[in-house]
Image (cartoon, grey):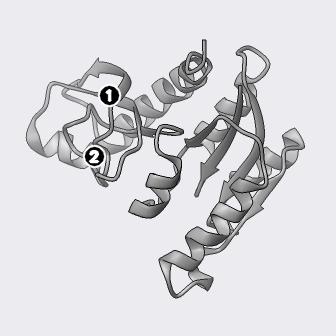
């Protein structure tokens, strides 16, 4: 199975996916970021994986940006687009073009807390458990069919920072394994 990984920031999930290639049955054929300053680019360089960069800030219209991404994707042979901390909402047209081939990981137990600030919202709501969700991407934000969820008990001493750390650790462990099971 061949995958393209989209990311925007530090690349912790990207790195776990790249490292997972040696254990699981998939190949990262390319990576993409909308952020030329993303520190995750270094993981692509270290693994000698091409990283295509298109700065979304250079485009006034979403359609032009999406067109450039589609040009990049259409030049490759791949099975799935894996979103690993890609912090840009995909347009409905883009999702329609690739629906069924886009996978995302979200730091909450969906359908609870779609969007941003999930850890803060979990604490403010007094939830007893928290976790992460891997799902297919559809036109509706963080609402696609769930592939896998993992959870943990929230401790009284937990803060936003500790929840972020716990979720990241789970994500880094389960995302590569889950990707490997997309095609059996």
The residue tagged 2 is 118
Between 16 and 141, the one lying in front of the other is 141
Which image quadrant for residue 3? top right
Which image quadrant for residue 180? top right
The residue sitting at 58% across, 24% down in the picture is 179
Q: Is residue 181 visible?
A: yes
The residue lying furthest to the bottom in this view is 60
x and y, in percent, of residue 31 in the image: 72, 49
The residue tagged 1 is 131
Q: Is residue 77 left or right of residue 98?
A: right
Q: Is residue 100 left or right of residue 27?
A: left
Estimate the spatial distance between the alpha carbons at disc 1 and disc 2, rounded to whole Å.
10 Å
The residue sitting at 66% across, 31% down in the picture is 17
The residue sitting at 65% across, 74% down in the picture is 55
The N terminus, quarter of image: top right
Q: Is residue 104 left or right of residue 57?
A: left
Q: How many marks?
A: 2
x and y, in percent, of residue 122 in the image: 19, 40
Determine whether the residue tagged by mark 1 lies in a helix, strand or loop.
strand
The image shows residue 59, relative to residue 154, as above or below, that is below
The image shows residue 106, relative to residue 140, as above or below, that is above
């Amino acid at each position: 199975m061949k995958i393209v990984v989209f990311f925007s920031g530090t690349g912790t999930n990207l790195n776990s996916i790249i490292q997972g290639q040696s254990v699981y049955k998939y190949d990262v054929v390319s990576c993409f970021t909308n952020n030329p300053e993303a520190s995750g680019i270094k993981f692509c360089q270290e693994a000698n994986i091409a990283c295509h960069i298109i700065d979304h800030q250079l485009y006034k219209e979403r359609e032009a940006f999406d067109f450039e991404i589609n040009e990049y994707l259409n030049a490759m042979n791949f099975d799935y687009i894996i979103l690993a901390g890609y912090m840009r909402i995909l347009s409905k047209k883009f999702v329609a073009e690739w629906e069924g081939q886009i996978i995302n990981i979200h730091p909450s137990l969906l359908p609870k807390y779609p969007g941003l600030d999930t850890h803060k919202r979990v604490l403010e709501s007094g939830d007893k458990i928290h976790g992460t969700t891997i799902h297919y991407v559809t036109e509706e934000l963080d609402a696609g069919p769930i592939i896998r969820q993992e959870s943990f008990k929230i401790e009284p001493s937990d803060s936003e920072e500790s929840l972020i750390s716990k979720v990241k650790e789970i994500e880094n462990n389960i995302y590569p394994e889950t990707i490997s099971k997309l095609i059996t």
